Amino acid sequence: MPELASEIEVSAATIYTRKSKYGGMNVSDAQKLKGLEDENPRLKHLVADLSLDKEVLKAVIQKKRPELAGMRKDVAFASERFPVSERRARKLLGTDRGSYR
């Protein structure tokens, strides 16, 4: 192993780590694993965004204001209470930009 590690200019620990992770896999399996590892953070981010949207909507629904002035207050409430922009809050609540302004 030390000769191989020096030949490809990596440490012996890197060789052992990769062998334990990818040992027994063929190239296509390793490529699939790498693709899944790359996709995982993107999917986690999507789930986090959807969970935040759900929490915003639940909080606003508990207030229940059907009139336009209430919608303005709901957008302000959502953007103040949660880390969402005014644009995102309006989109979640279905408020038109012109009506809001």
Image (cartoon, grey):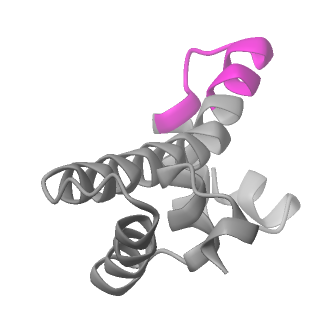
**What is the x, y in percent for residue 69?**
41, 73
Q: Nearer the viewer, residue 31 or 15?
A: 31
**Magenta span:** 21-33
Residue 43 belongs to the span the image colors magenta: no
Q: Nearer the viewer, residue 47 or 95?
A: 95
- Where's the C terminus, which quadrant? bottom right
Furthest toward the left, the residue is 62
Residue 23 belongs to the span the image colors magenta: yes
Residue at image x 86%, y 60%? 7
Q: Nearer the viewer, residue 18 or 95?
A: 95
Residue 29 visible in the displayed image: yes
**What is the x, y in percent for residue 58?**
21, 49
Q: Is residue 46 left or right of residue 33?
A: left
Residue at image x 20%, y 53%? 64
Identify the image quadrant of residue 86.
bottom right
Identify the image quadrant of residue 33.
top right
Q: Nearer the viewer, residue 82 or 10?
A: 82
**What is the x, y in percent for residue 97?**
72, 68
Residue at image x 82%, y 68%? 9
Q: Note whether 19 is above or below 80 in the view shown.
A: above
Q: Is residue 31 left or right of residue 70?
A: right
Instruction: Tell me which secondary structure the magenta stretch mostly adopts.
Output: helix
